[in-house]
Image (tube, rainbow, N blue to C red):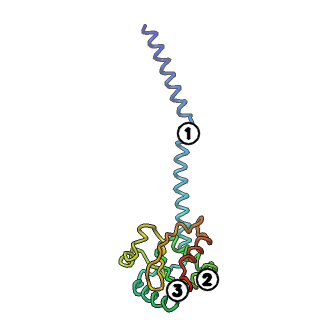
Amino acid sequence: MKKVSLIAFVALSTVIWAQNTEIKKTPEAKNSGDKALLVKSDAAELEAKKKAAAEEKAKLPKPYDPKADAQADINKLIAKAKKEGKNIMIQAGGNWCIWCLRFNQYVQSTPELKNVVDKNYLYYHLNYSPENKNEKIFAEYGNPGDKFGYPVFIVLDKNGKMIHVQQSDVLEQGKGYSLEKVKEFFNQWAPKKS
């Protein structure tokens, strides 16, 4: 009886050992090392993207002024808008925001958009940054950055009345902005000519 038990034990141990050895050869086990490589690869790719974004950001104009007296600036724009019959386009964000800088650059370097903006709007870059959050002004407009992120656009009529808030992600296309969507947005909120 002991011989049979010993033979059964040895046989069972051999089967278990063989199964464990086979498990180590399965794709799942083999891929655990591949997964570690993928994690390292993803981290390297993320670092490369961060570096590319930082380089891009360094080259773009910085239109936001944390030291500006935004309320005084907007009051002057309202007085000017009344005289010129234009609306006011407030692009809220900061120099820290790559999408804010991209949008500014896109509008400034796309003649078709720049013409629509220059004809219909007085444009203002309302700063939101650790140096100056312009909390009172943002609260006056319902804190749209809290809801939509940045950039966010606040459209005022010539009298300074808020007539629209626009999130920016709906204007995006790929790593930039859609000409058709941005142009439609600017045209839609331009002052109505009588």
User: Residue 30's mark?
Assistant: 1
User: Residue 76's mark?
Assistant: none
Tell me the CA gap for discs 2 and 3. Answer: 13 Å
Identify the amino acid type marked 3.
Lys
The outermost residue toward the left is 136
Residue 151 placement (x, y as % from top left): 49, 72
Q: In this view, does 168 lie above or below 31?
A: below
Camera-nearest label, 2 or 3 = 3
Identify the amino acid type marked 2.
Asn
Q: Which residue is nearer to you in this view: 41 or 127?
A: 127
Mark 3, other Cα within 10 Å: few <14 / some 14–19 / many ≥20: many
Identify the amino acid type marked 1.
Lys
The residue beneath circle 3 is 86
Secondary element type, mark 2 = helix
Secondary element type, mark 1 = helix
Tell me the CA gap for discs 1 and 2. Answer: 59 Å
Q: Is residue 178 left or right of residue 79?
A: right
Q: Residue at 46% of width from left, 10% of height from top?
A: 4
